[in-house]
Every structure is written in C-alpha cells, then in structure tokens.
Image (spheres, coloured by chain):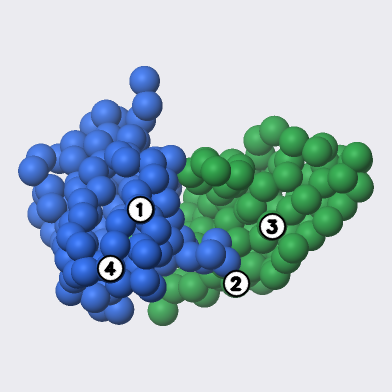
Chain colours: A blue, B green
C-alpha cells in the first residue's frame, strides 16, 4: 500500500490553464504539506495544513490554493498556469508532535508549455 | 529564524570511499534533525533522524550525530556503494514553528565503480 500517493505523476499543460494535483495519505496523519522542487533540486514549502490551521508560505502566488476535503486528502489547485510553474510538486504528511518525520509522495512533474 | 545549510555538490566518489556531507542549522527552540535521500525519479525517503543533542541516527551504514555545540548534523558513511548515488537533504523541524520542515539545498552524490 502506498502511504502518500499523488496523481498524476506527469502533467503537461498550456499556459493559462487551470489544473489540480491530488494527494491522498493512508497513514492517519493529521498534517499535510505541499512542496515545490525546482530544477536545481531545491525544496520550497508551499503550504502546511491540518484540520485546524493552514499555513501559507507568503512567497507563494495566490494562483495556488490547497483544498482539503478531509484529513486524508490535500489537493493543489493552480490557476492561470505560467511557464515558471514548471517543477516537481511533492505532497507529504506527518503526525503532529516532536520528532515526527514527513512521508513524501512520488512527486508530480508539471510542465507548462 | 530556522534554516539549514548543507555543503554544495555535486560530490563524486569512488566505490568504497568515505563520505561526509556537512550540514549546519539555525533554529529557535529545540529542533529535531533529519537526513532524507532522493533517488532519481522518486520522492524523498527518510534516511535517519535525531531528536536531541548527542543523539546519533543511523541507517544503512549512514550515521549522523546531533551536535548542539556546533549546530551540526553531518552525514557520514564509511564505504559508499554505487547504489548510494542520490540527492541527500538535511532537514529540521521544530515544534515551535508549527509543524514546518526546513530543508537544505540538497547534495547530489554520484558513486562510480
């Protein structure tokens, strides 16, 4: 069983489109995250979310929005896609509390053309 | 604030060579420290962790010791294998920062036969 799963694995789309990436975790965790990894492998936190609080990285454009229908899902919706949005997006989850590691999905490679 | 600085790569080693990847951190409160590994085309996997000063995390022949006095968590392996070729990320999380994980920039390791 995959602990954190993302779909799709690859996404190619045109500029200006709106797209969503889905994420599901079956670990019973209460905190989920979205990270963006650029071509140099740098990981940037975009959002962290639990059922109480959404923390947004202030540098993330408001074209990006997380949507959580329930504790096990945190989807990423992107409006008006731009070329610079091309990257690999990772979903992750963890328990709350000290010393708890994050579990990552396999990533979604987004290419905007 | 919280941040992680790790040595820049890429690092290329011959099989059976000794590996050190340096990592230093800045944190408020008492962070937990992690090393993650990312194999080509995959998500990040936890390699090891340490939750308090002087703890040593170890896994698959890799080790790292939480050094509070030098704010460091250097990754070491005595004899690397070709299968260790990957990108390695140092990370911290601190309960005071609302379940956020902070990652270093990643260090790419290539092991040649």
Distance from label 4 to label 2 (Cα)?
34 Å
| Residue B23 appears anywhere in the view | yes
Instruction: Locate residue B18, reporting x and y percent.
Output: 87, 49
Does dot 1 land on a helix, a strand or a loop? strand
At 64% from the left edge and 52% from the top edge, which residue is drawn?
A: B87
Chain letter of mark 3 equals: B
Distance from label 1 to label 2 (Cα)?
33 Å
Chain letter of mark 2 equals: B
Q: Are marks 4 and 2 on the same chain?
A: no
Instruction: Locate residue A31, reporting x and y percent.
Output: 24, 48
Within 10 Å of disc 4 (Cα), the crowding (few <14, some 14-19, many 20+) is some
Give the left or right position of residue B3, taking residue B86 as reference. left
Whether the residues at callouts 1 and 3 have beta carbons within 8 Å, the answer is no
Specify the quadrant that holds the C terminus of chain A: bottom left
Q: Are marks 1 and 2 on the same chain?
A: no
Q: Nearer the viewer, mark 4 or mark 2?
A: 4
Quarter-of-image position of residue B9: bottom right
At 66% from the left edge and 39% from the top edge, which residue is drawn?
A: B58
Q: Nearer the viewer, mark 1 or mark 3?
A: 1
| Residue B50 appears anywhere in the view | no
Say which of B11 and A6 sits in front.
Answer: A6
Specify the quadrant that holds the N terminus of chain A: top left
Whether the residues at callouts 1 and 2 have beta carbons within 8 Å, the answer is no
Does dot 4 land on a helix, a strand or a loop? loop
Q: Are marks 3 and 2 on the same chain?
A: yes
Residue on which disc 2 sits: B5
Residue on which disc 3 sits: B108
Distance from label 1 to label 3 (Cα)?
27 Å
Within 10 Å of disc 2 (Cα), the crowding (few <14, some 14-19, many 20+) is some
Give the left or right position of residue A1, taking residue B80 as reference. left
Residue on which disc 1 sits: A12
């Amino acid at each position: 069983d995959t602990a954190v799963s993302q779909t799709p694995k690859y996404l190619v789309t045109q500029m200006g489109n709106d797209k969503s990436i889905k994420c599901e975790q079956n670990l019973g965790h209460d905190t989920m995250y979205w990270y963006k990894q650029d071509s140099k492998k740098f990981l940037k936190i975009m959002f962290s979310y639990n059922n109480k609080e959404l923390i947004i990285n202030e540098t993330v454009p408001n074209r990006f929005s997380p949507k959580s229908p329930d504790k096990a899902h945190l989807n990423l919706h992107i409006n008006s896609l731009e070329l610079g949005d091309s990257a690999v997006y990772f979903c992750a989850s963890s328990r709350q509390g000290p010393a708890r590691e994050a579990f990552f999905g396999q990533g979604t490679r987004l290419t905007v053309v | 604030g919280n941040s992680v600085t790790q040595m820049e790569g890429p690092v290329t080693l011959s099989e059976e060579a000794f590996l050190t990847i340096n990592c230093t951190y800045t944190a408020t409160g008492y962070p937990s420290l992690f090393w993650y590994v990312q194999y080509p085309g995959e998500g990040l996997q936890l390699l090891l962790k340490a939750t308090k000063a002087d703890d040593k995390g170890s896994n698959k022949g890799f080790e790292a010791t939480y050094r509070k006095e030098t704010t460091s968590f250097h990754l070491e392996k005595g004899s690397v294998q070709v299968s260790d070729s990957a990108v390695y990320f140092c990370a911290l999380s601190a309960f005071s920062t609302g379940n956020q994980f902070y990652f270093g920039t990643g260090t790419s390791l290539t092991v040649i036969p």
